[in-house]
Amino acid sequence: NAGVTQTPKFQVLKTGQSMTLQCAQDMNHEYMSWYRQDPGMGLRLIHYSVGAGITDQGEVPNGYNVSRSTTEDFPLRLLSAAPSQTSVYFCASSRLTGTDSYNEQFFGPGTRLTVL
Amino acid sequence: AQSVTQPDIHITVSEGASLELRCNYSYGATPYLFWYVQSPGQGLQLLLKYFSGDTLVQGIKGFEAEFKRSQSSFNLRKPSVHWSDAAEYFCAVGGSSNTGKLIFGQGTTLQVKP
């Protein structure tokens, strides 16, 4: 049981390049999400998904696309990288058990992205 | 709108001393509250969570937190800090039921002096 995995761990891009950050979980979780972490700003939600084929925007979605074709995978795409997207990106997943409780969100180890 | 505030950006305590990290939230209904810890270069690990019931919740690594509805607070405490507790701590609130979304505070960095 690997939990939540993210690749790559580190990436350097030039402005205007595109790339995909990979996220996978093997816990059969319905919910998956992407956050970015910047100093002094905590974690901000980029996009999230409550199941295969269902995605929605979070707090800071501009410049990022997502899709959820399977339960396991939730890739994050940067279409045209900008220096403002330099950050650490975390993927997380959890079960959804109805209206009365949340389950713990499990986080991946993160991807450190630098855009020059 | 829902929000979480951690008033202390950085805290330094001596090893063996007690610790309290503050968290205030803004939420219109019953909140779902969490504390996570992030060691340097690592992902986030759940320390504890509050959904309902007893307002004093116990977590891993000897941490506890108390939910105070009247003060909109969910402060994290530990009676005796160890050097390995040095990390960044995040408070989070569930944005709405059945979506799984979390809103995080800005984080508090804990430094432990020997």
Image: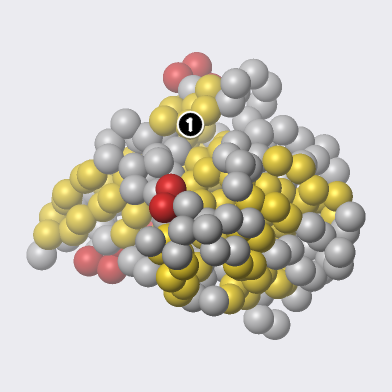
A42, above or below B22, in the image? below
Q: State left or right for residue A90 relative to residue B74.
A: right
> Which of the image's four quarters has the N terminus of chain A?
bottom right
Q: Nearer the viewer, residue A115 or A23?
A: A115
Q: State left or right for residue B29 relative to residue A89.
A: right
Residue A36 in sight from this viewpoint: yes
Q: Residue at x 75, y 75 (%)?
A: A26
Q: How is the image coloured?
A: secondary structure
Q: Nearer the viewer, residue B78 or B92?
A: B92
Residue position marked by numbered label 1 in the rendering: B4
Q: Residue at x 53, y 43 (%)?
A: A44
Please name the amino acid that badge 1 sits on.
Val
Residue A103, position as x, y percentages in the image: 71, 53
Total numbered labels: 1
Residue A64, position as x, y percentages in the image: 63, 51
**Dot 1: chain letter:** B
Q: Nearer the viewer, residue B72 or B109?
A: B109
Task: Residue at the far bottom: name it.
Answer: A1
Task: Residue at the far left: name it.
Answer: B114
B86, above or below B5, in the image? below
